[in-house]
Image (cartoon, rainbow, N blue to C red):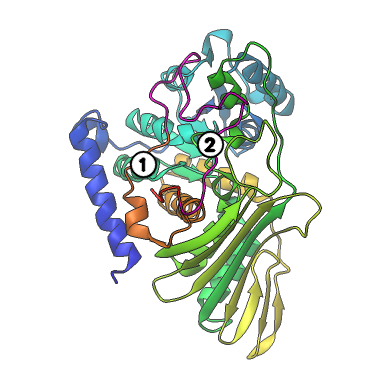
């Protein structure tokens, strides 16, 4: 079996070549023009996606060292944009300067915001839009911070990987909202595991078990597209299911420990209690067994059901000990128990501090590749639970299936539509294809 990294590298090379041939890279000179360090100049920021995470990411970007200013905003909905503008202005008033003419609404708002004189674009829309927005930002020569996940299907992952290579060629800086990578506690714990503190890692466990998230009921007069955009968490073309939108954090830590993604996946899932009229098409639980190239097993569990045992955590078992990674604790047969006791600043802020420093100093910073691999790992798991099949990484990442709609317009049909009772088709293991 080929090593997953060599397969991924050859895949990345081919997708970047394909993207250039297809014209998604405007021209070679543009693709290879390198961005200069920002130094002490003001970093001008555009926010694309003004929901709760967008507001948080913007406030954190505006709280980094040195001059920085929010100058453009974009969202599908005007009410969400204006609410975000008020919230961010209250949080960091001296760093917000977004005149009315730089506030854009609609499906094409992202492009208008990026056309403004900005250096850094924050991408925080529902993740189904991420590949298209990331590719556009990179083609325009913008630095990017994009929230996780970075796609909802394999086609989107291929777009992100190709754009990541263009960003590297242009020396653009790319941050991804997998903030555990910027936690001192996680960094030290993972380093110790990789250095052999628990021997050879044989088993990993990752959990995101919680009571679930919000719903946004249908309102009178909404088109189907608007309803799904408002209630986006429950539709795969926008969210990717909670295994992708949320559990990606824990899967990402497992990949971090192993240095890359798994090679096979099989699992099961379903909808035990998520059966309301506003629950769309996603599952409320997934359990996946992933296997890495060296035989290490990852048991992945995520659940959105109230009244149950909850855990958001990652664990490793090795030939000489165990680790609770999120707790920063290692127990080994060869040494006394170890517990992280150092400072661990807010990693939501640190990830922006690191990105801003890279923009100013011109140092390498591109998190898109591991963000894409961890996102694909979650999609890989969803493919397994929806289909009931055991599948392999190469087939999954090469899947031609795409979840995007044929058109982005308020009167256009989304990829999934309800029946006469307002119910959506639900994936059925044994019937639903893996790809």
Q: Mark 1 vs mark 2: give the one in front.
A: 2
Q: Residue at x 36, y 44 (%)?
A: 164
Characterize the local packing of mark 1: few (<14), some (14-19) or many (20 or more) Cα atoms within 10 angstroms: few
Q: Does the magenta portion include 407?
A: yes
For mark 2, give the secondary structure: loop
Give the magenta part as a residue range: 404-430
In the image, 79: left or right of 110?
right
x, y percentage for residue 318?
57, 81
Residue at which label 1 appears: 401
Instruction: Pick whichever, 249 or 119, lies toward us.
Output: 249
Residue at mark 1 to residue at mark 2: CA–CA distance: 17 Å
For mark 1, give the secondary structure: loop
Q: Is residue 25 above or below residue 304?
A: above
x, y percentage for residue 188?
60, 68
| Mark carried by residue 267 | none
Question: Quadrant of residue 423 in the image?
Answer: top right
Residue at which label 2 appears: 425
Characterize the local packing of mark 2: few (<14), some (14-19) or many (20 or more) Cα atoms within 10 angstroms: few
Q: Residue at x 27, y 31 (%)?
A: 24
x, y percentage for residue 161?
35, 46
Instruction: Pick whichever, 275 or 60, lies toward us.
Output: 275
Q: Is residue 91 above or below residue 401?
A: above
Q: Quadrant of the N terminus?
A: bottom left
């Amino acid at each position: 079996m080929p090593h997953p990294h060599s397969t991924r590298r050859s895949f990345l090379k081919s997708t970047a070549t394909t993207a250039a041939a297809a014209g998604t890279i405007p021209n070679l000179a543009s693709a290879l023009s390198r961005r200069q360090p920002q130094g002490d100049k003001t970093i001008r920021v555009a926010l694309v996606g003004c929901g709760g995470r967008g507001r948080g990411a913007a406030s954190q970007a505006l709280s980094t060292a040195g001059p920085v200013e929010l100058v453009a905003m974009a969202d599908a909905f005007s009410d969400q944009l204006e609410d975000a503008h008020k919230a961010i202005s209250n949080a960091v008033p001296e760093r917000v300067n977004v005149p009315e003419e730089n506030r854009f609404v609609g499906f094409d708002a992202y492009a208008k915001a990026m056309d403004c004189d900005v250096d850094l674009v924050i991408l925080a829309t529902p993740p189904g839009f991420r590949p298209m927005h990331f590719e556009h930002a990179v083609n325009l020569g913008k630095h990017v911070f994009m929230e996780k996940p970075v796609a909802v299907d394999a086609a989107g992952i291929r777009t992100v990987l190709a754009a990541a290579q263009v960003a590297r060629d242009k020396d653009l800086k790319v941050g991804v909202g997998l903030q555990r990578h910027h936690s001192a506690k996680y960094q030290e714990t993972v380093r110790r595991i990789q250095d052999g503190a628990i021997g050879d890692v044989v088993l990993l466990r990752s959990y995101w078990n919680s009571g679930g998230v919000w719903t946004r009921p249908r309102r009178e007069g909404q088109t189907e597209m608007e309803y799904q955009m408002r209630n986006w968490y429950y539709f795969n073309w926008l969210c990717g299911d909670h295994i992708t939108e949320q559990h990606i954090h824990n899967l990402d830590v497992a990949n971090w420990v192993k240095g890359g993604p798994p090679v096979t996946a099989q699992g099961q899932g379903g909808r035990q209690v998520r059966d309301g009229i506003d629950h769309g098409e996603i599952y409320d639980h997934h359990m996946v067994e992933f296997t890495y190239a060296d035989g290490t097993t990852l048991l992945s569990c995520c659940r959105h059901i109230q009244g149950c045992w909850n855990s958001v955590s990652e664990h490793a078992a090795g030939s000489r000990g165990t680790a609770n990674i999120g707790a920063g604790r290692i127990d080994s047969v060869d040494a006394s128990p170890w517990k992280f006791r150092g400072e661990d600043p807010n990693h939501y802020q640190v990830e922006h501090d690191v990105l801003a420093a890279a923009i100013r100093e011109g140092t390498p910073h591109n998190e898109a590749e591991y963000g894409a691999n961890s996102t694909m790992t979650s999609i890989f798991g969803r493919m397994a639970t929806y289909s009931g099949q055991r599948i392999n990484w190469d087939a999954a990442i090469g899947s031609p299936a795409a979840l995007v709609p044929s058109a982005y317009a308020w009167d256009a049909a989304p990829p999934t539509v309800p029946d006469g009772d307002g119910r959506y088709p639900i994936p059925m293991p044994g019937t639903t294809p893996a790809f």
